[in-house]
Amino acid sequence: MTMITLALSKGRIFDETMPLLAAAGIKVLEDPETSRKLILPTNQPDVRVVMVRATDVPTYVQYGGADIGVTGKDTLIEHGGQGLFRPLDLNIAKCRVSVAVRNDFDYEHAVTQGSRLKVATKYTHIAREFFATKGVHVDLIKLYGSMELAPLTGMADAIVDLVSTGNTLKANNLVEVERIMDISSHLVVNQAALKLKQEPLRHIIDAFASAIRKD
Ligand code: AMP
């Protein structure tokens, strides 16, 4: 029996991957929100799901801890994508990466004046590339969470973060001043597994492809 291991993270990615798995005839048998198990069984004895941190999904697939995974484009860019085949944009967990500042901060003036901008973010690759293309000098401050706090405490002028409804920014007196890119989650596949486990992986990739919502 060839075991297929799928890496997922809790939350939107897990929830929005379930209908795609259903299209492949796969049903996860435990709820990751209540189960303490890191490896979840499915109704298919040769398919299992490993629950990992969102930022670890590309790493698990790259090194063969999982054969396939679902991960945000933001996470994929920051990881670099080495060793990963990326056959499908799943059009799920959609949001955007944007620049936000305090609503009393004159962003336009700051970026045209040629002064250095202090930018706090988890997305250092995306932020560096974006501001380099604009010709804006930035000092990047790497954070791992609650980016919104950085401008409020005076630690940074701006943040680069994921925005979905915009409610989190609004609740913290921040405004979105630039949209850097649209984000959705992608299917990633270990390149060696794609050759060694071609048939079962093809079945999953094809079923996912036919179930993607186009909108
Ligand atoms: P919102 O208030 O709806 O704009 O959501 C913004 C907050 O949710 C931020 O803290 C983001 O980091 C997080 N967020 C939004 N969309 C996603 C997503 N697709 N994946 C992970 N985190 C997200």
Image: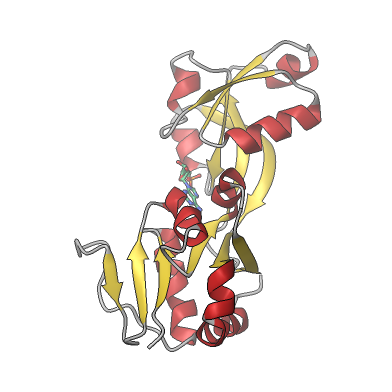
Q: Nearer the viewer, residue 26 or 156?
A: 26
Q: Quadrant of the N terminus?
A: bottom left
Residue 147, placed above or below residue 88: above
Q: Nearer the viewer, residue 129 or 46?
A: 46
Quadrant in the rendering for residue 123: top right
Residue 72, placed above or below residue 91: above
Q: Residue at x 58, y 43 (%)?
A: 78
Q: Position of residue 83 (x, y in %)?
A: 59, 58
What scheme was used to colour the molecule?
Answer: secondary structure
Q: Position of residue 88 (x, y in %)?
A: 63, 70
Q: Residue at x 19, y 61 (%)?
A: 36
Residue 2, placed above or below residue 111: below
Q: Residue at x 26, y 62 (%)?
A: 38
Q: Quadrant of the C terminus?
A: bottom right
For the image shown, how many numbered marks are present on the structure? Answer: 0
Residue 89, placed above or below residue 113: below
Quadrant in the rendering for residue 171: top left
Q: Position of residue 17 (x, y in %)?
A: 46, 71
Q: Position of residue 96 (x, y in %)?
A: 61, 48
